[in-house]
Every structure is written in C-alpha cells, then in structure tokens.
C-alpha cells in the first residue's frame, strides 16, 4: 500500500472531516490545527463524551463500563455528523460500533496510520488509557488492537495517511493536498 491512498467508492459529499486511527496517531494534535486552517470547528469526541457523562474517560470505563462508553460515543458521533464544517477527532475505538461505520463513510474520514511501535513510543506507559491497562508491552497490546481494527479503519476512510516520521505541519500539508478544493471558509 502506498502512503497516500484515496478511496473513491464514495464521493466527497459531506463537509465534516473525521480523524480516525489508534491512540497516539495524532488525531488530537492535527485536529485543531487542521480546523484552524479550514475555518472549521474542532470537536474532540472523547471530550464530548466525558462532558456528557460528567467524568473522565478512565472513570467512565471503570464506573459505567465500556458498553456505556460506546453507546455515548455512538450518540455523540451521530449528533456531530448532523452538523457541518467540523474536524472531528474520534477515539480510536469508534470503528468497533457498526452504526458508526455507516456514519463515518458519509464523512470525509481520514485514517492516520502508524506502526504499533511508533504509537507506543508516542503514548509512553499509557496509564490513563483504559485499553492499555495492565499491558506488559504497550506496543504488543496496540498491535493486537490494530489487527482487529485496521480493516474497519480502511473500510470507512476516504484518505489514508501515514504519520511515520512526519511533524504536524508536514502532515497537514499532505492532508490539505488530498482534500477536495472549496472546503475552507472564505478568509480562513
Ligand atoms: C479508545 C481510545 C481513546 C478513548 C477510549 C477508547 C479505544 O481515544 O476513546 O479510551 O478504544 O481505542 P484516543 O484514541 O483518542 O486515545
């Protein structure tokens, strides 16, 4: 597979950009910068879930369970996908809920890709991340999760971008070059 892959099975009709990929892939770093460049609103889906359920993500998993988290994740995604001109940074597990895939396919979904070892280096011990809890090797745990999710990331992404060895400016430049023209607001 090449670094840049444009999937043409669905046209660029929607005007939300959804960033997907495993934890550590750079969604929350790239998201606000990209939103500023386009004159779009930045939405951090985990932040919305956290605000809605009134506690940090780690506590949602511990106190309410993953199922409750996934339900809220799905309803927040649906809510924001009904609006326009947003860059939405999604949690890495957004693709495990079937309904979300349908939603993501209708947006300009961008898969930010990196190898598990790279992601592990960026994340560090990952103490706050529920899915990494108790992992002896973060890279190994991420590798297992990635092998389950990669087909879904690819299935709903219109653009796949390797983030290996790239700084945010480089990535944003590459991404902007692949987005359809006319997305940005006048004056942005
Ligand atoms: C998750 C990733 C997290 C967060 C939650 C579950 C996952 O988001 O949504 O801990 O299932 O991969 P980030 O990808 O932003 O870390």
Image: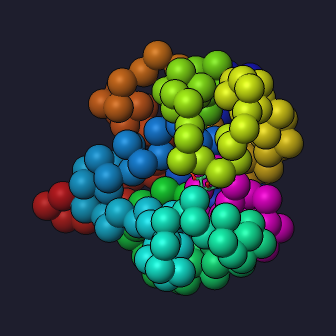
User: How is the structure coloured here?
Assistant: rainbow
Residues 142 and 87: in front is 142
Q: Is residue 54 magenta?
A: no
The residue that appears at 70% across and 55% down in the rendered structure is 93
Image position, residue 85 (x, y; %): 39, 70
Vertical position of residue 153 compared to residue 138: above or below: below
Q: In which quarter of the image is residue 184?
A: bottom left
Q: Is residue 98 magenta?
A: yes
The answer to whether residue 25 is visible is: no
Q: In the rendering, at what x and y percent does residue 77 appear?
A: 59, 74
From the viewer's perspective, tell me whether residue 102 is left or right of residue 183: right
**Which image quadrant for residue 79?**
bottom right
Front position in the image: 142 or 136: 136
Q: Where is residue 66 in the image (x, y as percent from the top left)?
A: 74, 66
Indicate the quadrant containing the C terminus: top left, top right, bottom left or bottom right: bottom left
Q: What secondary structure do most residues of the magenta stretch adopt?
A: helix
- Extent of the magenta region: 91-107
Quarter of the image where one finds residue 142: top right
In the rendered image, the vertical position of residue 133 relative to residue 182, given as above or below: above
Q: Nearer the viewer, residue 164 or 133?
A: 133
**Residue 169 seen by the camera:** yes
Please state, as top left, top right, bottom left or bottom right, where the N terminus lies in the image: top right
- Residue at (47%, 46%) from the top-left corner? 27
Residue at point 80% right, 50% down?
A: 152
> Is residue 187 toward the left or the right of residue 18 in the image?
left
């Amino acid at each position: 597979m090449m670094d840049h892959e444009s999937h043409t099975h669905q046209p660029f009709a929607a005007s939300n950009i959804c960033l997907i990929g495993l934890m550590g892939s750079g969604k929350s770093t790239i998201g606000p910068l990209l939103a500023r460049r386009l004159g779009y609103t930045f939405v951090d889906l985990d932040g919305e879930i956290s605000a809605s359920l009134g506690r940090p993500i780690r506590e949602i998993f511990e106190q309410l369970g993953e199922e409750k988290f996934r339900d809220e994740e799905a309803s927040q995604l649906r809510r924001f996908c009904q609006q326009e001109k947003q860059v939405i940074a999604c949690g890495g597990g957004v693709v495990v809920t079937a309904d979300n895939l349908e939603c993501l396919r209708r947006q300009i979904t961008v898969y930010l890709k990196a190898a598990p070892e790279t992601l592990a280096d960026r994340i560090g011990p990952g103490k706050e991340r529920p899915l990494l809890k108790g992992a002896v090797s973060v890279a190994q745990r991420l590798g297992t999760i990635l092998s389950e999710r990669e087909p879904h990331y690819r299935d709903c992404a219109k653009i796949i971008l390797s983030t290996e060895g790239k700084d945010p400016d480089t990535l944003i430049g590459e991404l902007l070059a692949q987005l359809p023209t006319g997305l940005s607001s006048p004056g942005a």
